[in-house]
C-alpha cells in the first residue's frame, strides 16, 4: 500500500485522492484512520472484483499479523462513513471469502486542482457543531476532526473535564475504567466509532475522573475514591442539566456505577456494566480475582514500563500485534496518568469490594461480559449479574476486555436494545445510605454540657452534608451519601464534643427505607447496634463501610465479630484509627 500516484477515483458523490490520502463527499472532507483509508483504496482500485480476506490482510497490514476482526472493523467503519443503507450499497460481502466494491468507479488524473483548493479550509463536524481547522492532510488523517469540545465543571477545588455528543432523548454517562483521556478517546477509530454509536441513540456524557486525563491532577494520596467519583458524576450531570441517566461502567467503572445506582436511584435510569467485577483481590468467596502476589507483580510492571503499551495483551489481545494500536494505547495511558498516579490507582482499585452493594441495586441493569476475557474472568461478570436482582446478563464470544476492540457491534446492539426499553422515572423508597449513630453519655454531671455537644454534632453534620434522621435520649442518627464522608464527620464530632462526655459512634452502609427526610430500616438499626458495641470514645464501623473507602487514607483495626439479636448473620467490625 505504499504506492504513490496522482489518480483521482470518483464513485457516487465521493472523490478519493490516492496520492494525498484524501476523501471528499462533494466539498466536505471525510476523516478516515490510516488503515481504513488503505482498505477503501484497495477496494476502489479493484472495483468489481472479489478480494479475499487473506489478500486484504496481507496488503493492508503488510508485515504484521492481525486477525480478520481488524478487517471487519474497517469494513464496518467504511459502510457507516459512506452512508450505506438498503437502497445504497458500496461494499458487498462475499460469504466465507471476502469483499467486493460494487459501485462504479471512474479513475483520472484531472481534478487535482480541486483538491488543492479545498485542502486548507475550515470544516464543520455536524455531530458536535465544532469548527476544526487543518491544513495538513497527514494531520487530518492522524487526528480525527470529530473530537468534541472539552468543557470543565468545578467540584470543590477540582476541575472535572467532560464532553457531550449526540442529542438523544435519554442521557448516557460513560465511565471508562482505570485510565482515561477524553481527547485520546477520539484518536483511534475503534474507540471513536464505539462512542459515536452510543451518541447516535442518546445524549452521551463523557468525563475524566479527577487526577487523570484532562481533569485537574491531584496529589497521589488524594486520588479519587469511589465516593468522590460519584460526586464528580453528580457535578458533571448537574453541569449539563441531566436529571437522570443510564450509567455505563467499563471494568473498574462498573463498581462505581453500581454504587451510584444504589445510592442515587432517582438519578439513574439504568445501569450497564461491561467486563466488570465486584472485588479485585482473591478470597475463598471470590476465587476468580488475582492473588495479592499477582496484583503486586502487575504494579511492578506499571512502575517499570509506564509509557509502553502496558497491559495490552490482557485488555486487547486481538490488537496486541497491531503497531498502530500499540502506539495509541501507550500514548493514551501516558497522557491519561503519570506513573505515580497509575501505580496509586492500581493499588487503590485492588481494594475495591462492592459485593454487599450489588443486591441493593434496584434500577434496570444489563451486565455484559466476553467469555474469554483475559483481564477479568467471565465468572466475575456472572457473579455480578447474579447478585443484582432482576439484572439481565449477556455473554459474547471473544477474548478482548476493551469493549471497543473485537466485535463492538454486538455489544452496542445489546446496549441500544436495553436503553430503548427504559421507560419513565420510577419512585424509589429504598436507597443505599451510610448511617451514623452517635451516643453521648456524660453521667449526672454533664447535664449542662450535653446540649452544647448536641449543637456541635449538628454543626458538624451540616458541614459534612449529613442529614439528621433521628434524635433521642442523647443519641443522634444521621444519613450520608458516602461512608468516607461519614467517618470524617465522626472524627470531627469526636474532637468537638465537650470534655467529660463519653461518646460512642457506630457506622454502617446499607439499605434504608426513605420517606422524604425520614430514614428507617435495617441500616439504621444496625448502626445503632454497632454504636452499642463501641467502647467509650471509639468509632466502630461494619466491614461494608471499610470495603467502600478504598483509597481514602482512612485506616482501621479489626475489632470483633458480632451477632445481634434479631439480625441475621455475623458482622465483622473495625475500629477507625
Image: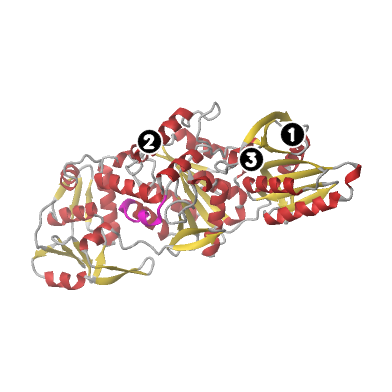
Q: Mark 1 points at which residue?
A: 567
Query: Looking at the image, do the residues carrying marks 3 and 1 touch, with CB atoms under 8 Å apart?
Result: no
218 relative to 105, above or below: above
Q: What stretch is highlighted in magenta?
A: 180-190
Q: Mark 3 points at which residue?
A: 545
Query: Looking at the image, do the residues carrying marks 3 and 2 touch, with CB atoms under 8 Å apart?
Result: no
- Residue at the location (58% across, 48% down)? 227
Q: Residues within 10 Å of mark 1 (few under 14, many from 20)?
A: few
Looking at this view, is 447 or 186 the one in front? 447
Q: Mark 2 points at which residue?
A: 301
Q: Where is residue 413 in the image (x, y as percent from the top left)?
A: 41, 50
* Residue with the most extreme right position: 444
Looking at this view, is 100 or 183 the one in front? 183
Element class at badge 3: helix
Q: Mark 1 or mark 2, which is nearer to you?
A: 2
Looking at this view, is 422 or 514 the one in front? 514
- Residue at the location (20% across, 41% down)? 64
**Gap between marks 1 and 2 measured at Cα:** 45 Å
Q: How crowded is mark 2: few (under 14 residues within 10 Å), some or many (20 or more)?
A: some
Horizontal side of residue 304 vs 90, given as left or right? right
Among numbered discs 1 and 2, the one appearing first in the sequence: 2
* Residue with the most extreme front position: 499
* Residue with the most extreme top position: 284
Amino acid at each position: 500500500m505504499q504506492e504513490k500516484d496522482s489518480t483521482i477515483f470518483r464513485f457516487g458523490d465521493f472523490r478519493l485522492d490516492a496520492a494525498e490520502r484524501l476523501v471528499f463527499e462533494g466539498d466536505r472532507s471525510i476523516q478516515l484512520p490510516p488503515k481504513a483509508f488503505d482498505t477503501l483504496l484497495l477496494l476502489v482500485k479493484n472495483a468489481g472484483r472479489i478480494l479475499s480476506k487473506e489478500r486484504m490482510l496481507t496488503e493492508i497490514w503488510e508485515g504484521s499479523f492481525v486477525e480478520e476482526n481488524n478487517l471487519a472493523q474497517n469494513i464496518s467503519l467504511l459502510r457507516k462513513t459512506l452512508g450505506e443503507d438498503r437502497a445504497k450499497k458500496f461494499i458487498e460481502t462475499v460469504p466465507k471469502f471476502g469483499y467486493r466494491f460494487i459501485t462504479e468507479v471512474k479513475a483520472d488524473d484531472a481534478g487535482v486542482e480541486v483538491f488543492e483548493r479545498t485542502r486548507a479550509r475550515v470544516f464543520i463536524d455536524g455531530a458536535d457543531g465544532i469548527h476544526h481547522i487543518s491544513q495538513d492532510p497527514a494531520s487530518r488523517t492522524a487526528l480525527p476532526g470529530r473530537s468534541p469540545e472539552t468543557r470543565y465543571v468545578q467540584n470543590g477545588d477540582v476541575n472535572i473535564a467532560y464532553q457531550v455528543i449526540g442529542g438523544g432523548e435519554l442521557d448516557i454517562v460513560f465511565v471508562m475504567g482505570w485510565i482515561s483521556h477524553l481527547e485520546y478517546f477520539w484518536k483511534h477509530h475503534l474507540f471513536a466509532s464505539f462512542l459515536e454509536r452510543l451518541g447516535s441513540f442518546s445524549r452521551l456524557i463523557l468525563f475524566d475522573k479527577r487526577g487523570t486525563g484532562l481533569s485537574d491532577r491531584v496529589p497521589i494520596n488524594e486520588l479519587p475514591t469511589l465516593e468522590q467519583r460519584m460526586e464528580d458524576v453528580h457535578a458533571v450531570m448537574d453541569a449539563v442539566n441531566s436529571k437522570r441517566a443510564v450509567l455505563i461502567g467499563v471494568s473498574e467503572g462498573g463498581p462505581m456505577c453500581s454504587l451510584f445506582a444504589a445510592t442515587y436511584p432517582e438519578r439513574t435510569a439504568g445501569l450497564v456494566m461491561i467486563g466488570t467485577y465486584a472485588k479485585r483481590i482473591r478470597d475463598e468467596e471470590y476465587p476468580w480475582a488475582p492473588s495479592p502476589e499477582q496484583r503486586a507483580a502487575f504494579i511492578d510492571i506499571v512502575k517499570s514500563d509506564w509509557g509502553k503499551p502496558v497491559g495490552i495483551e490482557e485488555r486487547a489481545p486481538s490488537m496486541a500485534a497491531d503497531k498502530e494500536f500499540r502506539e495509541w494505547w501507550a500514548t493514551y495511558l501516558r497522557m491519561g496518568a503519570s506513573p505515580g498516579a497509575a501505580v496509586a490507582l492500581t493499588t487503590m482499585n485492588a481494594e475495591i469490594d462492592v459485593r454487599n452493594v450489588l443486591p441493593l441495586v434496584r434500577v434496570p441493569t444489563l451486565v455484559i461480559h466476553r467469555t474469554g476475557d483475559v483481564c477479568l474472568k467471565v465468572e466475575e461478570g456472572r457473579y455480578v449479574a447474579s447478585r443484582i436482582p432482576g439484572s439481565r446478563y449477556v455473554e459474547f464470544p471473544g477474548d478482548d476486555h476493551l469493549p471497543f476492540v473485537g466485535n463492538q457491534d454486538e455489544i452496542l446492539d445489546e446496549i441500544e436494545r436495553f436503553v430503548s426499553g427504559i421507560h419513565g422515572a420510577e419512585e424509589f423508597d429504598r436507597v443505599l445510605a451510610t448511617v451514623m449513630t452517635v451516643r453521648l453519655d456524660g453521667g449526672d454531671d454533664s447535664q449542662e454540657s450535653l446540649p452544647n455537644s448536641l449543637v456541635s454534632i449538628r454543626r458538624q453534620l451540616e458541614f459534612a452534608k449529613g442529614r439528621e434522621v433521628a434524635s433521642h435520649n442523647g443519641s443522634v442518627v444521621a444519613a450520608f451519601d458516602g461512608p468516607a464522608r461519614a467517618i470524617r464527620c465522626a472524627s470531627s464530632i469526636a474532637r468537638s464534643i465537650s470534655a467529660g462526655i463519653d461518646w460512642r459512634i457506630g457506622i454502617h452502609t446499607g439499605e434504608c427505607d426513605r420517606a422524604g427526610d425520614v430514614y428507617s430500616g435495617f441500616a439504621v438499626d444496625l448502626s445503632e447496634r454497632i454504636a452499642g458495641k463501641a467502647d467509650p470514645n471509639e468509632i466502630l464501623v461494619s466491614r461494608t463501610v471499610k470495603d467502600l473507602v478504598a483509597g481514602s487514607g482512612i485506616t482501621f483495626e479489626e475489632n470483633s465479630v458480632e451477632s445481634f439479636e434479631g439480625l441475621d448473620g455475623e458482622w465483622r467490625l473495625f475500629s477507625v484509627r
